[in-house]
Amino acid sequence: MKLIYESYYQNLGQNIAFYRNRRKLTQLKLSELVEISRNHLSRIENADCAVSLDTVFAIAGALGVEPYKLFQDKE
């Protein structure tokens, strides 16, 4: 992950956590739905790693939101 994109990854992670909490899902449950480890999901939410678009699309699908919503700034 390039540091120049860090704010984008932070925004993505915050949005994933927001929609996950809105659906009352634990990290473990969402990670099972997306077929990734809970540790990997935690690292994504904390902007501690890069993430593939395939994984973003799978997370969006499991959360029931369009993928672009995971990249939008919350105001």
Image (cartoon, rainbow, N blue to C red):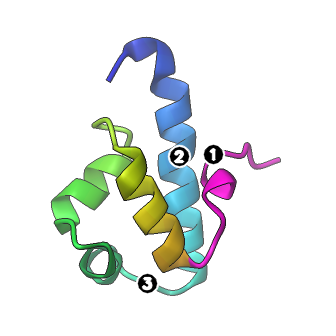
Asked if marks 1 and 2 touch (Cβ < 8 Å), the reply is yes
The quadrant holding residue 2 is top left
Q: From the viewer's side, name the closer residue of 52 and 48.
A: 52
Name the residue beneath numbered marker 1.
71
Q: Is residue 68 left or right of residue 48?
A: right
Q: Look at the picture and state if 70 lies above or below 61.
A: above
Give residue 25's mark. Answer: 3
How far apart marks 1 and 3 lie (CA) works out to: 20 Å
Q: What element carries label 3?
A: loop
Circle nearer the N terminus (1, 2): 2
Name the residue beneath numbered marker 2.
12
Q: Is 29 colored magenta in this rendering?
A: no
Majority secondary structure in the magenta region:
loop
Residue 21 visible in the current orientation: yes
In percent of width and height, residue 41 lies at 29, 59
Asked if marks 1 and 3 touch (Cβ < 8 Å), the reply is no
The quadrant holding residue 22 is bottom right
Pick out the residue farthest to the front.
Answer: 54
Q: In this view, does 46 lie to the left or right of 49?
A: right
Q: Which amino acid does label 2 sit on?
A: Leu
Q: Is 68 colored magenta in this rendering?
A: yes
Q: Is mark 1 on a helix, strand or loop?
A: loop
Residue numbers of the magenta segment? 64-75
Number of residues whose C-alpha sits closer than 10 Å to that of mark 1, classed few (under 14), some (14–19) or many (20 or more)? some
